Structures are given as C-alpha cells and as structure tokens.
Amino acid sequence: MGLFDKCYDYNITEIVKEKGIYPYFRPIQESEGPVVMMEGKKVVMAGSNNYLGLTAHPKVKEAAIAALDKYGSSCSGSRFLTGTIDLHIELEEKIAKFMGKEAALLFSTGYQAGQGVIFPLVSKGDYILSDKDNHASIVAGNLLSASMNANVIRYKHNDMADLEKRLAQIPEGANKIIVTDGVFSALGTVVKLDVMKELAKKYDAKLLVDDAHGFGVLGKDGKGTAHFFDAQNDVDLIVCTFSKTLASIGGFVVGEERVINYLKHKSPALIFSASPTPASVAAASAALDILIEQPELAARVCANADYVRRGLMDAGFTVIPGQAAIVPVIIGDDEKAFGIWKMLYDEGVFVNAFISPATPPGMQMLRTSYMATHETEHLDFIIDKFRKVGKQFDALNNDAVIAGH
C-alpha cells in the first residue's frame, strides 16, 4: 500500500455528508455566546468550551485590540529568544498568584502545555502513571517520553485501586509521576483527587493535573480541581489552557519556581514554538481579571450544567453524572448519534457528536457543555428540543445513569 492510499480510501466523511448528517467543521458566522449564527440561522450553543462566556465580553475584546495596536499581530519569535513581551511576564505572575503557586509559564497552545511539560521532566527508567482517558496532549507527552525509554503505565479510568496496584509494582526508589485530567473532556467526570493525593504521598510520586476543563469552573473562586479538593498544596504541577475559561488561545503550567525555570529552558514545545500573540495574551489576562472580580461566574457554570443534567435525566436520557460544565448524553450508536445531532441542529440546538473509535463501543454520545451566560430560557429550550428529538429516535429510557462514572 502506498503512503497516501489510506487517504484516497478514506471515504466515511463523504458517506455521512451525502446523508446530510455530518456534524463537524460547521462554520460559525457570528457569536454572541449562548446564541450563535450558523448557516444563516440562530442556534443555541450547547457545545462550546467558552465556560464563562467571555469571548464576546467588551473588556476582553478591548484588551485584545489595545495589545494589537501596541505590539502588532505577532511576537515574531519564541519565548526563548525575541518572542517575550512584558504582557507574557505580567500574565505569568498573575496566574501564579491566583493559583497559589510560586511561578507560571505560558505556552502557545494548551496542547503544547500538556505535551511540553511531561517530556522534559522524565528520564530513562522513570515512570509515568497516566489515566487511560487522559487528553491527547498528555498521550503525546507520554509517547515522546517513552521514545526516550521512560516507562508509561496506563491505569483504568479514574480507578484508584488500579492506580495503587500499578504504583505498588514499581521498584522502590524509582522516580514516578502521576498524570491525570482534572475534569475528563469527554465524560465530564472529575478525578478522585482526594484519594490520588494520598496515593502520591504513600508511594512518593509527583502529581500533575491537566485542568483544562476544571479551571474557572470548579473550586474556590474557580481555581480548579485541586482547590475543589483542597489539594492545591498536594499537586505539584497544574497545566491548563486559555481556550476554555480564559476566552483565548494558549496554555500555562504552574508549580515550584525551580521546576518552572527548568521547563523554561528545557521544554522543546516552548523553545521551538512562536510565543503566544499579544492579542491572545491580553485577552486571557482580561478574562482572568473578570474571573477574579466575579468568582460567582464559576458557580453559575456548574448550576447551569446541573439544571440541564437533571432535565435530561428526568426526560429519560442516559446521562453520565458529573459536577462540572460537561453533560454527556449516551446514545450508543454511530448513525443514531449523527441522526439525533442533525435533528437537534435543525431544531436550533448545537451539540457535539462523539462516535467510535473516539468512544468505546456502546458509549457513542452527544457531548453538551454549558456557559455562565446561558439563561434559563436557553437551558429550557435545549431540554425541550432534546426531549422532542429523543422521542422520535426512541432514545429515552429509564436507565438514566451510567454506573461507575
């Protein structure tokens, strides 16, 4: 088989498009937060990671415009050389203070932060213990580390008994780090950090949490999963992205100053990438200011998600319970998931379709997520449309909770 033959043979997207149920790469023409314009019509957005609803906030947009005027469109270099501006340093200091850590380091994307922190820290013979459902950026960091002969052990999703079993099998004295999402991006489940932090102490392991979906949503003042469990002093490194709560693009890691300084000089993902643009950094900084000034926004995100979660469960949908902004609705079949997605879209609700192989068989889902700016009328509209479409597709049942999640 030729190198590109698999590309020519890949026709599943054309088949789905011909059926009119292709759910991906749909362009948004205008965005007001909870309501967007898509293909010439207004749609209630129930699939965005814009958790605080700040992407259209006047202060965020004004900050981005001011930075563009002052610094131009790009920093034209990596942070390591000519790409650092005072905005980068100011935001790093602000994030570190907000998170209660000694130092922070910005990356150009959240993916680079996840991938770029693990690889520089581990050496040949070290051990990474990684949840099987961790984000792709962590998986990439694990693979890079494995290429340098670090040991990668994947434990069952959020299974602390399996994690301890794996920890107990590692030779005494070996370096090890537990790596986990704070809130898992597909299922919306929250890591059992209260148990995990004790295991890390017991087995002398470092602990890294990727809090992309927990920051700005969980914990005191929206400080994330570690603060939600009062474990901020037990988590060594917290990785996050700007693209959810902070209404921008980029990422960061916080931790001890000496560790952050090492990453600053040793992480290829930082050194060999152009630095975050002035406008994106300024937007993230303004969004963080709003979160600091209005911590109630985080509670509102969770309250809105809980409202829909209860509504969909009451309607008879199979819903994975959770405490954050993500509400997954299990459909269990690829074509049925696409069909329900399309009818919801036609009814004026946009959600995300997750199918195999991105999900295990039987766990194909419509992943919904909520914002602080959703009003009750938006949430009721979403629930009503789900109920209507669910009846037509025979997707309602009495087993409304997936056990074990």
Image (cartoon, rainbow, N blue to C red):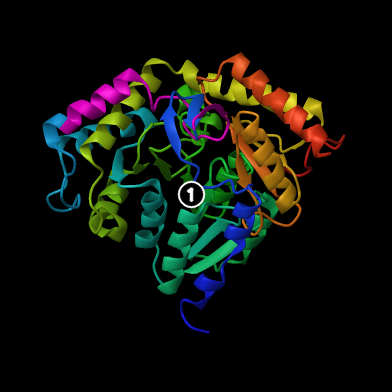
The residue at the point 47 percent across, 42 percent down is 235
The residue at the point 48 percent across, 19 percent down is 297
Q: Quadrant of residue 132?
A: bottom right
Question: In the rendered image, which quarter contains the C terminus?
Answer: top right
Q: Position of residue 46 (x, y in %)?
A: 58, 31
Q: Is residue 310 visible?
A: no
Residue 87 placement, left or right of 234:
left
Q: How many marks?
A: 1
The residue at the point 29 percent across, 39 percent down is 103
Q: Nearer the viewer, residue 11 or 89?
A: 11
- The residue tagged 1 is 207
Residue 144 placement, left or right of 201:
left
Q: Position of residue 260 (x, y in %)?
A: 30, 48
Q: Quadrant of residue 303?
A: top right
Mark 1, Cα crowd under 10 Å, few <14 / some 14-19 / many 20+, is many
The part of the chain drawn in magenta is 40-68
Q: Quick check: 109 above or below 267?
A: above
The amino acid type found where label 1 is placed reads: Leu
Q: Position of residue 95 (x, y in %)?
A: 32, 32
Q: Is residue 130 visible?
A: yes
Q: Is residue 43 magenta?
A: yes
Q: Quadrant of residue 237?
A: top left
Q: Nearer the viewer, residue 10 or 324?
A: 10
Q: Quick check: 62 above or below 360?
A: above
Q: Secondary structure at mark 1?
A: strand
